[in-house]
Amino acid sequence: SKGIYDLAVLKAIRTIPRHVFFDEALLKYAYQDNAFPIGEGQTISQPYTVALQTQLLEILPGDKVLEIGSGSGYQSSVLLELDATLYTIERQYKLYQKAKQFLTSFGYKNFNCFYDDGSKGLEKHSPYDKIIVTAGAPTIPNILIHQLKIGGKLVIPVGNKENQIMIRITRIDEKNIIQDSFGTCSFVPLIGENGWNE
Ligand code: SAM
């Protein structure tokens, strides 16, 4: 009813038990359509937002996807349910470790977790079919566009530290992109070389 029409995305959201990503004290909120704390001052994204970003990426089975901001690993699981090959980066060590542990325990195989500043992307494994940024950026880092394949898509919230606009970039050739906007959202800040200062 909020505009998620991609049946594969809805199925993935229905399949993944969101409560496993929650601390005991917050368990009763696990199936509310809101963001909640996951420690280290960070949040698990709202299910609607996870679904929207995933739908905008138009994931095809086998797509090579870079996720910047692993957080709890919930969005990562949705991408893996859609048969993406996932490279996910997190700058908070404890969250990096926890997300890696979750994804392994769920039995997913096609993923690699990295502990680093994802605002620089992940050159080593580029180019990607899709890039998703799950933290709010002040501007669109050019380096991420350069790490996309031609025809690839980048979905990134861009704005100030409180509110952002959901942007989708499609790289149509070496020099040209198409930019579309998909309403307002509110993410924790992307911190790093091409994000906000800590
Ligand atoms: N999608 C995640 C989920 O489903 O739980 C939520 C991600 S949370 C809203 C944003 C995450 O981005 C936080 O865990 C934060 O530490 C991380 N982050 C912020 N800046 C980053 C950067 N430069 N590189 C990698 N991760 C970053």
Image: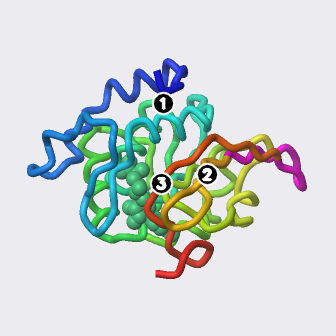
Residue 103 or 140: which is nearer the viewer?
140
Residue at 33% x, 51% y: name it. Answer: 44
Q: CA distance from mark 2 to mark 1?
A: 25 Å
Query: Tag 1: Cα neighbours inside 10 Å, few (<14), some, or many (≥20)?
Result: some
Side of 150 where 143 appears, left or right: left
Residue at 33% x, 62% y: name it. Answer: 42
Query: Tag 2: Cα neighbours inside 10 Å, few (<14), some, or many (≥20)?
Result: some
Side of 81 where 61 appears, left or right: right
**Dot 2 and dot 1 residues touching (CB under 8 Å):** no
Numbered mark located on residue 186 in the image: 3
**Dot 1 and dot 3 residues touching (CB under 8 Å):** no
Upstream in sequence: badge 1 or badge 3 = 1
Local secondary structure at mark 3: loop
Numbered mark located on residue 165 in the image: 2
- Ligand 1 is found in the corner quadrant, namely bottom left
Side of 197 where 21 appears, left or right: left
Displayed quadrant of residue 182: top right
The residue pinned by badge 1 equals 82
Q: Amino acid at mark 3?
A: Ser
Q: Amino acid at mark 2?
A: Ile
Numbered mark located on residue 34 in the image: none
Give the image location of residue 77, x and y in percent. Answer: 38, 40
Give the image location of residue 13, x and y in percent. Answer: 38, 29
Local secondary structure at mark 1: loop
Which region shows up in magenta? 168-177
